[in-house]
């Protein structure tokens, strides 16, 4: 057998001792074979080096989960009015990327008229629901009529699914009011009759966690609290605005649960004496939502005896805090990590733009409140907002995402009107502006709900794109034209490194 190896260096002393090996004579055929082997060896070494080098660069470009969400952004911070482009930018198919013509952010089209038979698809119908999985590699999609899917997201290449114009969506055959786990990228929690259950997208295994001891159904929507500290839902008979019970369990130890009866003032059948317990002759739960970190559950009531029905329950202490009064109580809320925010409008109450931070355990303590996103001039109440703060799970001081939607046309263009923005929480009043969301259509579902990822790099949002997306399927969203889902890139600084890696 021919052996082709490299010759080692032989010292002078070895030669003197006759230790200098003399290689056997090689034929031309043998010599050709040996040269071929050497070339293949060199090529394998080069390939191995490139693979190791690429993996090293990827590890630098994609930090290990969880990545800490940024405290600042590079988006535009000017406060000059920016008219909404009309007509809106022309869109390509699903997985095409456009650049916002005003603010320069990249926007990925996630769905189009050929997705799911042309149905209108949104990510959710509020900003305080978790639509991103724990490490920003999968998202939620749903119709407004009861169907839902999940689909992969590639944060390096800024694509969904396999990156083609027709990626596969993974349809789920259970209640569409589910939420992703805050800590496990594979897990989501869903309503399952009289049980809260979890589903693994990698194994497709369903695990039943538990339900109310009364056997009553879990209903309305799942709310994941903190880092999967609790998973909650409304419970019992009723409809949105009339539910009077809550059920929560610890998914890490499901035998630990709380069955909360608002009308009878009990938790697990034990009477409660909290002076802030929610009351009202026809009190009913309208919505619930979990905090990004900690153990707070936000609840909005109807038929309440105080303010506008805003309440927070600390599940660690079983204590309530109520937002009483009317001033600065408007706007949609969300919970970060140790703080609560609602779109209160301006400090003087004369403009819809603005928000207020509160302590979730002391909602009405003015010494713990802070106004943010305040306009330079107060013009009037022309818009509203949906907020999302899941990036606070990795950075309690992270800015808050707002997607503002139009109500009435202002006398002239206004800053932040119809925009996707981030508001600083440090008292600087800084607002970063990323894109126009092209909301509208005269329907609740046209409000361009947006949700931020845990790492603060991406925001999902839905839009009717100023009515240019074609006719809807049986007016499934209550609108004559379709809705689609998009992702706006919030941290473009990552792009150059990722492109170099590719």
Image (tube, helix red, strand yellow):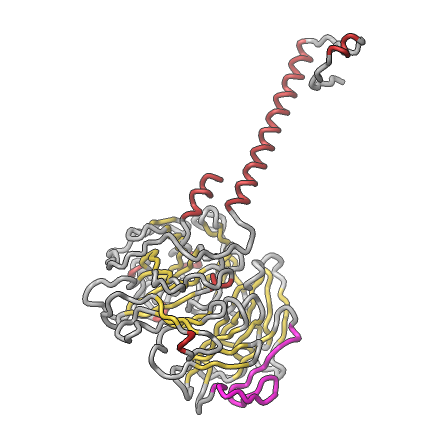
Residue extending farthest bottom:
281
Q: Where residue 185 appears, x then y in whole percent?
A: 56, 58
The residue at 45%/63% (across/down) is: 397
Q: In this view of the protein, which residue sits in the foreground, 273 or 89? A: 273
Answer whether residue 74 is magenta in the image. Answer: no
Relative horizontal placement of residue 349, taking residue 263 as reference (left or right): left
Q: Is residue 17 visible?
A: yes
Relative horizontal placement of residue 156, taking residue 184 as reference (left or right): left
- Quadrant of residue 71 in the image? bottom left
Q: Is residue 478 visible?
A: no
Residue extending farthest front:
367
Q: Where residue 101 appears, x then y in whole percent?
A: 29, 51
Q: Where residue 428 appears, x then y in whole percent?
A: 35, 62
The residue at 39%/57% (across/down) is: 486
Q: Is residue 406 above or below residue 239?
A: above
Q: In this view of the protein, which residue sits in the foreground, 126 or 291? A: 291
Q: Main secondary structure of the magenta part?
A: loop
Quadrant holding the N terminus: top right
Q: Is residue 443 above or below residue 6?
A: below
Q: Which residues are magenta?
A: 254-278
Q: In this view of the protein, which residue sits in the foreground, 295 or 145? A: 295
């Amino acid at each position: 057998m021919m052996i082709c190896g490299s010759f080692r260096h032989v010292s002078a002393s070895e030669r003197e001792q006759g230790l200098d090996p003399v290689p056997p004579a090689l034929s031309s055929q043998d010599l050709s074979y040996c040269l071929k082997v050497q070339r293949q060896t060199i090529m394998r070494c080069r390939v191995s080096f490139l693979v190791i080098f690429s993996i090293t660069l990827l590890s630098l470009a994609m930090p290990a989960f969880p990545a800490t969400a940024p405290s600042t952004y590079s988006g535009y911070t000017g406060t000059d009015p920016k008219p909404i482009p009309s007509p809106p930018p022309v869109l390509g198919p699903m997985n095409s990327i456009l650049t916002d013509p005003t603010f320069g952010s990249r926007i990925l089209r996630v769905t189009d008229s050929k997705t799911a038979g042309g149905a209108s698809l949104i990510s959710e119908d509020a900003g305080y629901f978790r639509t991103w999985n724990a490490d920003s590699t999968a998202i939620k999609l749903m119709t407004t009529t009861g169907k839902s899917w999940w689909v992969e997201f590639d944060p390096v290449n800024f694509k969904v699914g396999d990156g083609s114009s027709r990626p596969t969506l993974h349809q789920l055959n259970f209640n569409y009011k589910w939420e992703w786990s805050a800590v496990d990228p594979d897990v989501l929690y869903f309503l399952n009759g009289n049980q809260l259950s979890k589903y693994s997208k990698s194994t497709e295994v369903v695990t039943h966690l538990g339900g109310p001891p009364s056997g009553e159904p879990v209903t309305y929507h799942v709310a994941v609290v903190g880092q999967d500290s609790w998973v909650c839902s409304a419970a019992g008979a009723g409809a949105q605005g009339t539910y009077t019970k809550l059920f929560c369990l610890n998914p890490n130890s499901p035998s630990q649960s709380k069955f909360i009866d608002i009308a009878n003032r009990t938790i697990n059948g034990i009477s409660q004496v909290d002076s802030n317990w929610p009351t009202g002759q026809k009190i009913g739960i309208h919505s619930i939502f979990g905090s990004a970190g900690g153990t707070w559950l936000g609840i909005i009531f109807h038929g309440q005896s105080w303010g506008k029905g805003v309440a927070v329950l600390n599940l660690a202490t079983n204590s309530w805090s109520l937002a009483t009064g009317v001033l600065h109580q408007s706007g949609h809320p969300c919970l970060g990590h140790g703080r609560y925010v609602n779109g209160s409008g301006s400090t003087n109450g004369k403009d819809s733009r603005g928000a207020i931070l509160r302590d979730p355990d002391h909602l009405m303590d003015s010494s713990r409140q802070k106004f943010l996103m305040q306009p330079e001039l107060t013009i009037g109440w022309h818009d509203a907002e949906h907020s999302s703060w899941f990036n606070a799970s990795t950075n309690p001081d992270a800015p808050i995402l707002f997607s503002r939607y139009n109500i009435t046309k202002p006398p002239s263009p206004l800053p932040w009107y119809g925009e996707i923005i981030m508001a600083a929480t440090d008292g600087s009043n800084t607002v970063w502006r990323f894109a126009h969301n092209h909301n509208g259509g005269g329907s609740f579902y046209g409000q361009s709900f947006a949700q931020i990822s845990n790492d603060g790099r991406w925001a999902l949002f839905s839009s009717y794109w100023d009515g240019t997306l074609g006719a809807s399927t049986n007016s499934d969203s209550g609108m004559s034209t379709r809705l689609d889902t998009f992702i706006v890139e919030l941290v473009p600084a990552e792009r150059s490194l990722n492109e170099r890696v590719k």
